[in-house]
Image (cartoon, helix red, strand yellow):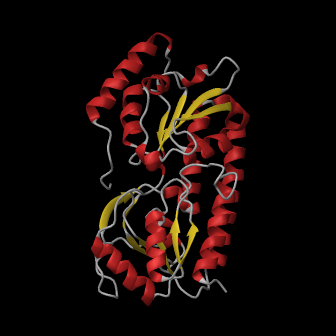
Amino acid sequence: MNVRRLIPATAVAGAAVLGLTTLSACSSSDAADGRSDGTLDVVASFYPMQFLAEEIGGSHVSVTSLTKPGVEPHDLELSPKQIGSLSDADYILYLKGIQPAVDDAVGQAGVKNTVDAASLTTLEDHGTEVDGHDDGDEHADDHDAEDGDGHGHEHVGADPHIWLDPVKYAEVAKGVGTSLEKADPDHAADYRENTAKLVAELNALDTAYKSGLKDTATKTFVTTHSAFGYLAERYGLTQEGIAGIDPEAEPSPARISEIHEVAEKNKATTVFFETLASDKTAATLAKDLGLKTDVLDPLEGITDKSKGADYLEVMKSNLAALQKALGAK
């Protein structure tokens, strides 16, 4: 995993002890208990996990996200109250490796029904540059080797952005559905039905991406946030990240120079930025190269600036943006 601006471990641990001690008297680790209204009290770490819990859980769950809309999830800091509330949850759904504060707090909570979405699929190593190809579901593994232009791939580490690949996200959805069935067997049939519906929608989204990106003028796109490695590999594209997986990381002068060269050679038309981080770097690079800027949303949160009301709508907007930038025919 790439180096992030981690919250000091001592601060997190201290807050966790405070929160868990304060609320231990009313805590429970038994998911079968549920809330007073009969629903499961589900805590999700951030939006992609919240979406899964709400879509699969339906009317049988009450979902709370630890990450408020508009907050960059990588930088999340938890209050003692939030940390304490984890121990009262019936079910926790998080993605290990993307939010250090959450990883630490979940470990302290000790909730029986705790699900790490990263364990429900296979994570891969991605760097700032990720090459896609057209040989089905097989993915390239070596991102440290030189490509055909003689450029070395910057090795960053295990990429947590699995939800941006509809196929991997569907794998996670199936795992979440199974875990909810075990946590709340009385409503297992509904969870199975909701899971099947969501997986069908994700499969349709995958088909739309395959068709929409099959024939394009270029396969290379430039983005400030290297969140789209799985998407690039899935649909035969090349992601050229200005910086690393951390959206706030500053690119090196050498990387900026390389982006200039690659963008010109591959006839890139657009520099993508995201809604939850500054577009300053994208705007500067686009101006230098005479390119356009546009939003490619990593879907780490939904706000009033998002081009869609939920995951599926924003992913369709992302597809439209990629088709335009890549010159889809």
Relative to residue 75, is residue 208 drawn left or right? right
Q: Please state, as top left, top right, bottom left or bottom right, where the N terminus lies in the image.
A: bottom left
Depth check: 150 or 235 in front?
A: 150
The quarter holding residue 317 reads bottom right
Depth check: 195 or 235 in front?
A: 235
Q: Please state, as top left, top right, bottom left or bottom right, where the C terminus lies in the image.
A: bottom right
**How far across and how far down the image is residue 118, in percent?**
44, 49
Q: Determine the residue positioned at 38% across, 48% down.
A: 97
- Identify whether 127 is placed above or below 136: above
Labels in figure, total:
0
**How far across and how far down the image is residue 273, in percent?**
51, 65
Q: Determine the residue positioned at 66% across, 77% down.
A: 212
- Identify whether 82 is placed above or below 247: above
| Residue 168 in view, yes or no | no
**How far across and how far down the image is residue 323, in percent?**
63, 77
Relative to residue 168, is residue 55 drawn left or right? right
Depth check: 113 or 246 in front?
A: 246
Relative to residue 3, is residue 165 drawn left or right? right
**How far across and how far down the image is residue 270, in percent?**
54, 77
Depth check: 114 or 76 in front?
A: 76
| Residue 221 in view, yes or no | yes
Q: Determine the residue positioned at 62% across, 66% down.
A: 318
- Identify whether 143 is placed above or below 97: below
